[in-house]
Image (spheres, rainbow, N blue to C red):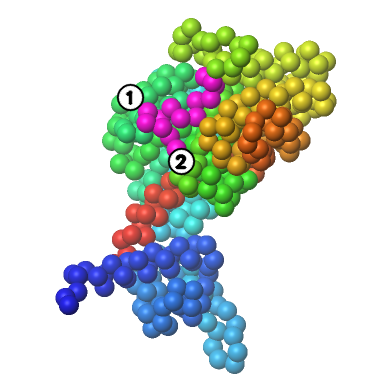
Amino acid sequence: MSRSPGTPRLLRRLNDRAALELLLADGPLTRAELGERTGLSKVTAGQLLARLEDRGLVEVAGERAGGRGPHAALYGVVPSSAYVAGLEVLPDSLTVGVADITGKTVVEVTVNPADARDPVKTVQDAVRRACDSARVSLSQLRAFVIGTRGVVDPRTGDVRFSLDLPSWHVGVLASLRQTLGASVTIENDVNLVALAEHRYGAAAGVDDFVIMWAGVGQGLGVMLGGRLYRGITGGAGEIGWLPVPGEPLPDDVNHPNSGSFQRLVNHDALSGLAAQHGVTGAGVPDLIRNGHEGYLDAVAARLAVGVAAVAVVLDPGLIVLSGDIGRAGGARLAAKVQDAVARVCPTRPAVVTSGVAGNPVLRGALVAALEQAREQVFSDTV
């Protein structure tokens, strides 16, 4: 029986990828430990490490004391072998994070767009500023992921619809790729929050869950079977347009905050609800943090309308509340929403608050960028 050509090369590549992922997750490791965890012999593990050292992907990161013999070298992934950039774009600010291939964020920079009508120049200037601060060249960036409000077409990658960012339209992605390279990706911001929660937060280890973003806008990030669900046109999760009994249907979907669920839970609505309950504060997050039980019960009842609609359609088992309202309410609000959903919904999903520290959109963008970069770098070792 003849062997398929290229099989040894393919096996080496697969072994290299497995070793690099293991070193990222559990490293640094000795040659013997790497061989034991991958099932490779010491000789093969040694050859693998030598090959990865030659490619500049692995380096000796220390020693481990053993018995009477010499100390064993510890190997780890070279952090500077590649970098990625994640960006969050808002109407009045743009935040850039740069991380090395191990996932460590080396710099985070927030800038005010000098000209919001020219998103390509704004992004380019912000990325250059971040790279200068991190002392990283643009050529070292292997992936860029940009999180924006609005609907991103999964077929083309273009922003199809965004009320808050009208200059982010079809054609911007192509221009960004001409400027920064082919590895630029645009993604809906709440989808990126779902990636961050799956990697670092309340949904770590859970492959079926929903992020409910409650704040200035309303949205869902849906993960099923460990994969983001975007819908055919990218419109999955636009829960602000959910029809709600007692709230008028929109006459024009191009008008901001005209969706029924948006009218029920947006900042203006929750501020008015606070006034009815005699709750005062500086902004809705402050009202939520300081609100008494009656006010929080009323807020939870409104959020439960959206959560119940998601639960009866998808039955995800876990709903994570995020956005400035979800994060301000914390576990206290999440528990009230869970109880309110159980009263109106035959399925009873667990409702928890976000577990991601810092900027969840930016962290999700870096997660997505790292996945792309590692696929490029770690798949080309032989």
Earlier-in-chain disc, 2 versus 1 = 1
* Image point (75%, 22%), residue name: 298
Q: Is residue 47 left or right of residue 360?
A: left
Q: Amino acid at mark 1?
A: Val
Q: Is residue 57 left or right of residue 276?
A: left
Q: Position of residue 67 (x, y in %)?
A: 60, 89
* Image point (63%, 24%), residue name: 305
Q: Give the crowd class for mark 2: few <14, some 14-19, many >=20 residues within 10 Å.
A: some
Label placed on residue 228:
2
Q: Position of residue 367 (x, y in %)?
A: 48, 47
* Image point (48%, 7%), residue name: 251
Residue assigned mark 1: 170
Q: Of 52 and 118, which appears nearest the observer?
A: 52
Q: Position of residue 144 (x, y in %)?
A: 40, 42
Q: Is residue 53 left or right of residue 262?
A: left
Say which quadrant the N terminus sits in.
Answer: bottom left
Q: Of 50 and 239, which appears nearest the observer?
A: 239
Observer-side mark, 2 or 1, equals: 2
| Residue segment shown in magenta | 229-242
Magenta stretch contains residue 255: no
Label 2 – label 1 distance at C-alpha:
22 Å
Q: Is residue 263 above or below residue 196?
A: above
| Residue 278 appears in the picture as rendered | yes
| Residue 141 appears in the picture as rendered | no
Q: Is residue 68 above or below residue 300?
A: below
Label placed on residue 341:
none
Res 368 quadrant in image: top left
Q: Is the magenta region chiefly helix, strand or loop?
A: loop
Q: Position of residue 58 (x, y in %)?
A: 42, 68
Q: Residue furthest front?
A: 346
Q: Give the crowd class for mark 1: few <14, some 14-19, many >=20 residues within 10 Å.
A: some
